Structure formats: structure tokens, C-alpha cells
Image (cartoon, rainbow, N blue to C red):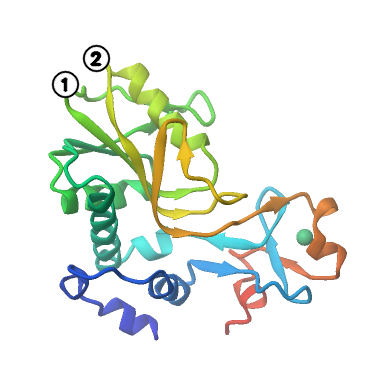
Amino acid sequence: MTLKEVERLRPEDFKDINVPISTMLKWFDVCDAYWMHSGKIEDPHVELTSGKCSNGFFDCLRVLKYLNLSEILANQMARKIRFYMPNEKIDWVIGSPMAGITFGHDVARALGAKIFMFTEKDPSQNGKMLWKRVQIPEGETVLQIEELITTSTTLNAVKEAVDEGNYSPVNWVPFIGVLVHRPPELPVSYYGDRGVISLIEKRVWAVEASECELCANGSQRFRPKTHWAELTGKR
Ligand SMILES: [Zn+2]
């Protein structure tokens, strides 16, 4: 499959089917949005911006920037959410900046939710989010959608911001929807009291180079953003 073919995929062709994870990963691969270490010790691995080593890389924006892929994946997300919560009323969908905004918007539309909104990054406090522009009326239900979950940090910052910034108590539905769930350990089924509904799930670890088994065995490490070809073997 080529990028040209992916660009031509039509959302209506995927509306009533469950797209296999392997197919979605193929789209990510074609968009250079995904790479996982093969497990072979001699193959290279990822050097993160933090300086840590990792066995995997995801950049959802490289997929979600395509309107057709965002719509197809949002429809898939909505199908899965409706499978787990067939009768749950979902009034609001809330996402986080940046890559999660357009995806959350598309999921809200696919679910038939009334409102989509997103939290903002607090410029004065790293990692903190703000909720100050709109108010969720009492009794309305809220679903959180994320494009990527690595740890619970952003996830919880969104919930905390909305809970703190909203005048009346917020009625969260019992699940969070996420396009790519890539925790350092699996399985993770819950964050707090909310379950996880993911389309793609992979265990992606990150460790200091001094503790990295791949480095210790001579595997080279590359930064995905600058050395994609060396990392992936793609030309
Ligand atoms: Zn390493």
C-alpha cells in the first residue's frame, strides 16, 4: 500500500465494518507515523528527545492530518464506544491540545454528541490544563477522547481542569476513548475509575540509556524525527 492509495481511502467504505488493527497500523506505517522494534537485538531502536531509549514510536498527527483518515478512525472509535456503551447518553466530548482536538471533534460528530470542546494548556504551569471558556450544565454527560495515551498525566490533567473549572459537578461517562494506547506496561484497563477503549494498543517502554538492554547488546539508537530512514530501514 502506498501513500497515494491511503490518501484516496473513502470514509463511506469503512462506515459499517470493523477495521482490523493490522490495517490501521499499515496506514500509520505508510504515513511514517509508527515504528516498533522488531525484537531482533541487532536492529536499531529509538532515541527520545528526553535522551531515553525506546522500542517504539507513534506520531498520530502524521495520520490525523489527513481528513479522510481522521474521519475513518473517528468512525471506528465511535463504533467501539457504542459497542461498550450502547445506551449511554453522550452530550459532550472533550479532548486535549493539540493533536487530540481535531480527532475529538471528528469522534464527537460520529457519535452524534451535541458539543465538542477541548482544554487548554496552562502557560504558567507545565503539564496543567485549564477549563475556563464554557460551562457544562448539570446533568449533561461528558466523554473524554484522546489521540494518544502514554501515561495518565495528560489524561488526568484534562479531567482535573474540567472538574475544577466547571461550576457544577461533571458527569463523566465510565470510559475514555483513545486512538493509540501505548502504556509502558500492559495490560492497563482503567485510569482511575474510567475504563479504556482503544483502537490501537501497544506496549512501548522508555528507559535511560544506561539501563537499556538494546544499547547493552550493541543495537544503535536513532532519533525518529531526524533519522527516520536509519531507524526504519525505509528509503
Ligand atoms: Zn538504548
- 125 up-or-down from 81: above or below: above
In the rendered view of the protein, which quadrant contains the N terminus?
Answer: bottom left
Mark 2 Cα-neighbour bin, 10 Å: few <14, some 14–19, many ≥20: few
What is the quadrant of residue 53 in the picture?
A: bottom right
User: Residue at label 2?
Assistant: 168
Q: Which mark is residue 169?
A: none
User: Residue at label 1?
Assistant: 137
CA gap between label 2 and label 1 equals 7 Å
Q: Residue at x 16, y 35 (%)?
A: 91
Left or right for 170, reference 46: left
Q: Can you tell me which quadrant of the image ligand 1 is in?
A: bottom right
Q: Residue at x 33, y 18 (%)?
A: 165
**Identity of the amino acid at label 2?**
Ser
Whether ligand 1 has any atom under 8 Å from the Cβ at mark 2 is answered as no
- The answer to the question of whether label 2 and label 1 lie on touching residues, with beta carbons closer than 8 A, is yes
- Does dot 1 land on a helix, a strand or a loop? loop
- 105 up-or-down from 13: above or below: above
Quick one: label 2 or label 1, which is nearer the N terminus?
1
**Identity of the amino acid at label 1?**
Pro
Q: Residue at x 39, y 35 (%)?
A: 194
- Does dot 2 land on a helix, a strand or a loop? loop
Whether ligand 1 has any atom under 8 Å from the Cβ at mark 1 is answered as no
Q: Nearer the viewer, residue 122 or 202?
A: 202
In the rendered view of the protein, which quadrant contains the C terminus?
Answer: bottom right
